[in-house]
């Protein structure tokens, strides 16, 4: 809208200048025009050309005043847009970004995570009755986590709360809501996802191959900042152990979005081909709230 008004003013400015030049070139009485006053209060002794010249000159001065005002605001707007624009981060080798990211994530005392899975089902129990769908929670280094996990049972979708302290896990019973200790073979343990030897940080440090830097971009539903966007492959053995057999052991395609200043990982997407399904299993993990203060303790009462 502002640009349209400026173009309109510029048109009138040029048109008025042309009219003045045309009238003055055909009149011999323009010298009597009094231009000493800012508001053009002088008189013209010419009946025809002089009168027209006064009106047109007043319009010209009026246009010039507003042209200067709009040009000033346009310059201010341009400066603000340039100042608010996120600077383009430096281009670094992809392997260097991944190495720095592994170190940065390992150094975090805590963070918030959201895990979304779509595609082929991923079962968290040996009987293959509970399919993992989503988890949202917090991780506290070195071995504590709490999350709300959404699982799919035959004919039912429900959320259960999970607390992990080291190798021990508790969950709320979907029917009674009471805490109960889980068996060791229950598939999803949030603390293992971020454990130093087999967790995400270890995978980033040792298992990534063919990593390329795709550029920089902003996540539509994430932080308003430019992030490195990388793609590569991850060998599946450590993923298989980390996820409790939910992911892997085949090679998995991976995309990552990394903050340039801190090398913190904001999002990772892993696409796993599934041999007995027409659609792959897609895992998206978002990280935020790095370094927040947390207290995670075992539930006050639980049934073994």
Image (spheres, rainbow, N blue to C red):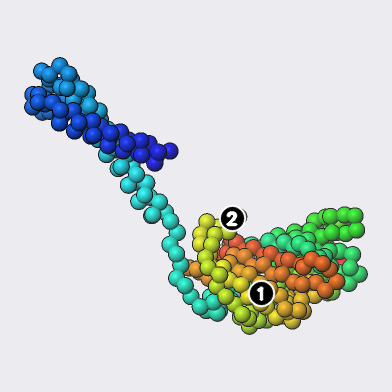
Q: Earlier in the sequence, mark 2 or mark 1?
A: 1
Residue 247 lies, in percent from the top left, at 76, 73
Secondary structure beneath dot 1 equals helix
Q: Quadrant of the N terminus?
A: top left
| Front residue of this view, candidates 20 and 153 | 20
Check disc 2: other Cα within 10 Å, few if <14, some if 14-19, many if 20+: few
Residue at (76, 79) in percent of width and height:
250
Mark 1 lies on residue: 200
* Residue 220 visible in this rendered orientation of the protein: yes
User: Which label number is shown at residue 277?
Assistant: none
Residue at (38, 55) in percent of width and height:
83
| Front residue of this view, candidates 171 and 280 | 280
Residue 64 lies, in percent from the top left, at 25, 35
Mark 2 lies on residue: 220
Residue 6 lies, in percent from the top left, at 35, 39
Residue 198, located in which quarter of the rendered image? bottom right
Residue at (15, 22) in percent of width and height:
50
Residue 222, located in which quarter of the rendered image? bottom right
């Amino acid at each position: 809208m502002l640009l349209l008004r400026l173009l309109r003013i510029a048109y009138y400015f040029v048109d008025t200048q042309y009219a003045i030049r045309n009238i003055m070139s055909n009149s011999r009485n323009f010298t009597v025009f009094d231009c000493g006053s800012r508001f053009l209060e002088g008189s013209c002794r010419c009946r025809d050309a002089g009168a027209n010249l006064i009106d047109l000159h007043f319009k010209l001065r009026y246009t010039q005043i507003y042209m200067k005002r709009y040009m000033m605001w346009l310059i201010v707007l341009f400066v603000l847009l340039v100042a608010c624009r996120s600077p383009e981060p430096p281009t670094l080798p992809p392997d260097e970004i991944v190495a720095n990211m592994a170190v940065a994530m390992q150094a975090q005392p805590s963070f918030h995570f959201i895990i979304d899975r779509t595609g082929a089902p991923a079962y968290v129990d040996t009987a293959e009755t509970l399919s993992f769908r989503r988890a949202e929670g917090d991780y506290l280094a070195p071995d504590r986590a709490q999350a709300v996990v959404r699982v799919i049972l035959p004919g039912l979708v429900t959320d259960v709360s999970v607390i992990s302290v080291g190798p021990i896990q508790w969950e709320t019973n979907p029917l009674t809501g009471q805490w109960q200790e889980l068996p060791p073979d229950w598939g999803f343990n949030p603390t293992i996802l971020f454990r130093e030897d087999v967790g995400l940080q270890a995978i980033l440090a040792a298992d990534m191959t063919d990593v390329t830097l795709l550029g920089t971009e902003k996540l539509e539903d994430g932080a308003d900042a430019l992030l490195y966007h990388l793609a590569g492959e991850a060998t599946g053995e450590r993923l298989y152990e980390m996820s409790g057999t939910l992911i892997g052991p085949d090679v998995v395609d991976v995309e990552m979005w990394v903050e340039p200043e801190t090398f913190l990982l904001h999002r990772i997407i892993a696409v796993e081909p599934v041999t007995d399904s027409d659609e792959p299993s897609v895992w998206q993990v978002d990280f935020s709230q790095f370094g927040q203060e947390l207290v995670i303790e075992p539930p006050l009462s639980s049934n073994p």
